[in-house]
Image: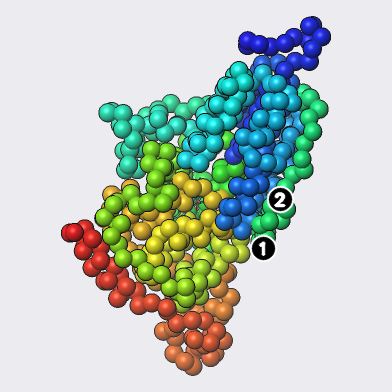
Amino acid sequence: MSGMASESEGRPLRPIIVWFRRDLRTDDHAALIHAAKQHVPLVPLFIFDTELILSLPSDGAAFNFQAEALVELGQQLHQLGGTLITRHGRVSDVHREIIHELHPLALYYNRDYEPYARERDAKVEQIYREADIDVHSFKDAVAHEPDEVLTGKGAPYVVFTPYANAWKKLSHPLPFTRPKPFSTPHVPHDRLLGARELGKPIAISDPAFVGGEREAHRRWRHFLQSMIVAYAKDRDLPAVDGTSKLSASLRFGCISIRRMIDDCDKALHRATTAQQLSIKKFVDELIWREFYVSVLYHYPGLTHSNYREEFDKMPWRFSTKLFNAWKEGRTGFPLVDAGMRQLNQTGWMHNRVRMVVASFLTKDLRHDWRKGAACFETKLMDIETSSNNGGWQWAASTGVDPKPLRIFNPRLQSERFDPEGDYIKRFVHELRRVPAKYIHSPHAMPPTLQKEFGCVIGKHYPAPIVDHAAASAEYKRLFAAIKSR
Ligand SMILES: Cc1cc2nc3c(=O)[nH]c(=O)nc-3n(C[C@H](O)[C@H](O)[C@H](O)COP(=O)(O)OP(=O)(O)OC[C@H]3O[C@@H](n4cnc5c(N)ncnc54)[C@H](O)[C@@H]3O)c2cc1C
């Protein structure tokens, strides 16, 4: 590599900066592995852009997860002989300081595809290039980058199935071997910041979600060994622990997507036909993640606008009272309420229920999907702009989903996916004694039974805040009207 000073000249070797962002692990970390091959000291760097963080809406769940993952990253780097260097400040300022202090040989980092990150990274690359320092970026967060999965004409896919078919035709990148040991020169660093220090008053802590590489691998091994084969059957049942719960680990890069896909490929070879269906279903979900990464990469304006422009004319409405009832889980629709309370209590919500609560807010309450997406941004531990935006626009019918209109009936969803009400009762405690017959529509319970089960409607638990049939009919009418304009 050009410009490398050798120790024989009596000067210390110029280090390579490995900039960690949403890739908080050492296993199968593309930038780290390539940097370690250069046999020079490495400076693993993480920057808290405190100004940006303070402006983010998160209530802290995601930052807590990140803080845990950073502590462990420090330990893992230590085992390789290095030290994690954390700095606080504006990203470009910190990089300028680092260049000034260390005169590094190169910057290595893994690519991020979100609109904000791309802009930031382009600026940082420019700073290094102006200082005549090499920059090397790597594919790491996805198996196939947005520009690798394109139609025959080189256009992005906007429908999932053809995207997934094209994705599956590509050969998957294999995990790298363990990075070689390295050293880190003495560099001053700031302390690690958790949610509280970042001014994000975290109220939740769920042992099911611990940030860090070790916990992500433990969960992944458990899922792979005993759960993935039943995934197709269990994934839609919120009362069952049937999904990987690795979304926050994937978001913060505590586990490598290459490793997960490679493990799934190996598991497929050992599986029966029925088990293979389940494993393939799981891989499909990983592809959904990359599909939404690709959609947002090619259409960055979707963070604030509808993919289907006719929805610009949709007369959304807003009621603080209704919105707060939804947000706090007091709508009188048990599955919706359980979902929102799960989110408030744990920082995570089951996928089936995310779809139901999002449909409810947009179709039943006719609130703009952007309000819901912003609420999820404050609360989700796994908040990922691409998937959150994709999920909300899917639920609101404003996005890339080709199905013209789908409206979830919250009661039918509840009967189908939580028949005994086990999930509902876990989060909506006032319904704990309500029998399965009434758990999906507690307001239909005769008053004597309401008293007997300690759940008087209007006193202990609300009556439904909206008439689903009337709201759906109205939504369909408005949908037809905006389509014909
Ligand atoms: C309105 C709405 C908002 C959402 N917001 C987010 C978000 O901010 N961050 C996020 O990671 N996921 C989001 N999702 C997708 C999905 O709900 C979560 O990824 C999933 O519930 C995470 O649980 P899990 O890890 O157990 O998933 P599993 O079922 O175990 O799936 C494995 C992985 O596949 C990916 N995945 C699964 N389903 C989807 C999907 N529908 N879209 C994209 N990726 C998927 C995730 O990375 C997940 O960890 C959202 C879905 C909806 C409907």
Q: Secondary structure at mark 1?
A: loop
Which image quarter is the C terminus in? Answer: bottom left
Judged left or right of residue 293, residue 224 is right
Q: Residue 47: x and y, percent?
A: 67, 39
The answer to whether one can see residue 447 in this image is yes
Relative to 398, residue 12 above or below? above
The answer to whether one can see residue 381 in this image is no
Q: Quick one: label 1 or label 2, which is nearer the N terminus? A: 2
Quadrant of res 276: top left
In three-dimensional space, the C-alpha distance between marks 1 and 2, rounded to whole angstroms, equals 13 Å
Quadrant of res 297: top left
Mark 2 Cβ and ligand 1 under 8 Å apart: no
The image's colour scheme reads rainbow
Label at residue 203: 1
Q: Please tell me which residue is depicted at 54% across the width and 78% down the height of the picture.
A: 431
Q: Residue 231: x and y, percent?
A: 48, 49
Which amino acid does the dot numbered 2 rest on?
A: Gly
Label at residue 194: 2
Q: Please tell me which residue is depicted at 69% across the width and 52% down the height of the picture.
A: 198
Q: Please tell me which residue is depicted at 69% across the width and 47% down the height of the picture.
A: 67
Which amino acid does the dot numbered 1 rest on?
A: Ala
> Farthest residue toward the top?
8
Relative to 201, residue 415 above or below? below
Which image quarter is the N terminus in? Answer: top right
Judged left or right of residue 267, residue 356 is left
Q: Residue 457: x and y, percent?
A: 49, 86
How busy is the neighbourhood of tag 2: few (under 14 within 10 Å), some, or many (20 plus)? many
Q: Residue 442: x and y, percent?
A: 46, 81
